[in-house]
Image (cartoon, rainbow, N blue to C red):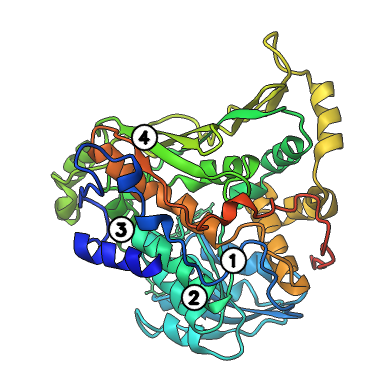
Amino acid sequence: MKSNRRDFLRVTGLAGIGLAGANIIEGNATGLSGENSRQPSGRQAKHFNMSGYAAPKIDVVRIGFIGLGNRGPGAVSRMSKIDGVEIKALCDIRPEKAEKAKSLLANTSHRPDMYTAGENDWKKVCERKDIDLIYIATPWSLHAPMAVYAMEHGKHAASEVPAAVTLEECWQLVETSEKTKKHCMILENCCYDFFELMTLNMARQGYFGEIVHTEGAYIHALLESNFEKEGYYDMWRLKENMRNGSLYPTHGLGPIAQVLDVNRGDRMDYLTSMSSNDFMMGAKAKELAATDSFYKPFENKGYRGNMNTTTIRTVKGKTMMIQHDVTSPRPYSRIHLVSGTKGTALKYPEPPRISNGHSGWLDETEFKALEEKYAPPIVKRVGELAKQIGGHGGMDFLMDWRLIDCLRNGLPLDIDVYDAAAWSAVAPLTEKSVANRSNAVDVPDFTAGSWKTNQPVDVLLQKGGNTKVKI
Ligand SMILES: NC(=O)c1ccc[n+]([C@@H]2O[C@H](COP(=O)([O-])OP(=O)(O)OC[C@H]3O[C@@H](n4cnc5c(N)ncnc54)[C@H](O)[C@@H]3O)[C@@H](O)[C@H]2O)c1
């Protein structure tokens, strides 16, 4: 029950604190898994089921953007190309960043108001009466507070990944979304990449048979970027790397969670997580601090083990493997493996490939035929436009377009608050497991049992799909 859960957080001293470094064992003293270590009673009482919830149609979706650093401006530009969107507000604590994002709208009809008057000016954006959607691209620690405040002020919230950094924040998102009936989407763009969409459609149509195992990853050499003075605002990303676990799991996890119908027919039951030592970040900090006092505060800190490997088992007995490595000098990979009783899909290294047996992968012609057959309607409808507009090869645009199209047509979102919570929760849960010799940790059921009857994502675009694009 909700009150039990809160009481539990209070008595264990977990309420309101991040789990980073807290190294707290819930439940029984002998290990991290088992009935006693579950979220108390699995939170049986819920306000409302947001999965499949169709909010009232919004003809023109009025958007306020918060966070206009590396990531935010691209979203402003993409949204300006979607029919039925009005950009009402741009907010960043750094005025020059907001101004730069505004310049992207110079030749459009959008005339946003600017909010750059300090660290709390974003609240004024959420408090406006003439905004429908708050789009958040700030440092991780601000995502959940901003999304919660937005929903409490009657706005739908869309947050960059991860949507929350602590379990408590994950619950706050769920409870606020259910209470306000406002959507809370995690902007997991990788769910809209072309091969990922195709494999989701193939999975739905039984191509892989019963899916047994899946893999995803975030392997991206960001060592230099994390230490760049002008890289991320106030070095936030380097500071986050002082937590130890799979800190950024959702790019790999989101697409395979959808393939496995997590929260919509199955759910993540428990995970175990193991990290290597840090062989690079501490050394880099030391090297830089030797000649530049700016880096002194980053010296002699405990950094995330460079490679984290997490395995997750679902209630229905499927497995997921997630890797996280943002320091090693190796080619980018999100893996995306789907392995079933009848077939396998694999992306990274590219090009992606499909197989039906142990003798090898299908050839290019056979792959193209599958692409023709299984490219889902969203790709057929706006895939080419998305590639022209761009954003990680087009997937960012597909995500934004689908979000707006769902809001305009009053359709449930593909990615709801339970996905935002469960996918984001993996990071703090892995921190617990890593800190305790990889002991198993239960994944809370944020749906409070509704996963058994929630409907899968509409990959066939059965409704909507009529929002036009202006380029
Ligand atoms: N989905 C993807 O592919 C993808 C890619 C890159 C980044 N991201 C995510 O986007 C988010 C932003 O990342 P980034 O690389 O743009 O970081 P960034 O540091 O460049 O941008 C964050 C912005 O937030 C602003 N900000 C900080 N505090 C604020 C406050 N109180 N009020 C208003 N603005 C504030 C900063 O000034 C900065 O401009 C992160 O969550 C990151 O994980 C996602």
Looking at the rendered structure, the secondary structure element under dot 2 is helix
Query: Dot 4 surroundings within 10 Å: few (below 14), some, or many (20 or more)?
Result: many
Q: Which residue is mark 3?
A: 235
Closer to the N terminus: mark 3 or mark 1? 1
Closer to the N terminus: mark 1 or mark 4? 1
Q: Which residue is mark 1?
A: 49
Left/right placement of residue 191 relative to residue 234 reads right
Looking at the rendered structure, the secondary structure element under dot 1 is loop
Residue visible at 56% across and 36% down in the picture: 316
Nearest to the eye among marks 4 and 3: give it: 4
Of 353 and 388, the residue lying toward us: 353
Mark-to-mark CA distance, 2 and 3: 19 Å
Question: Where residue 307 appears, x then y in whole percent?
Answer: 35, 32
Q: Which residue is mark 2?
A: 98
Identify residue type, mark 1.
Asn
Mark-to-mark CA distance, 2 and 1: 36 Å
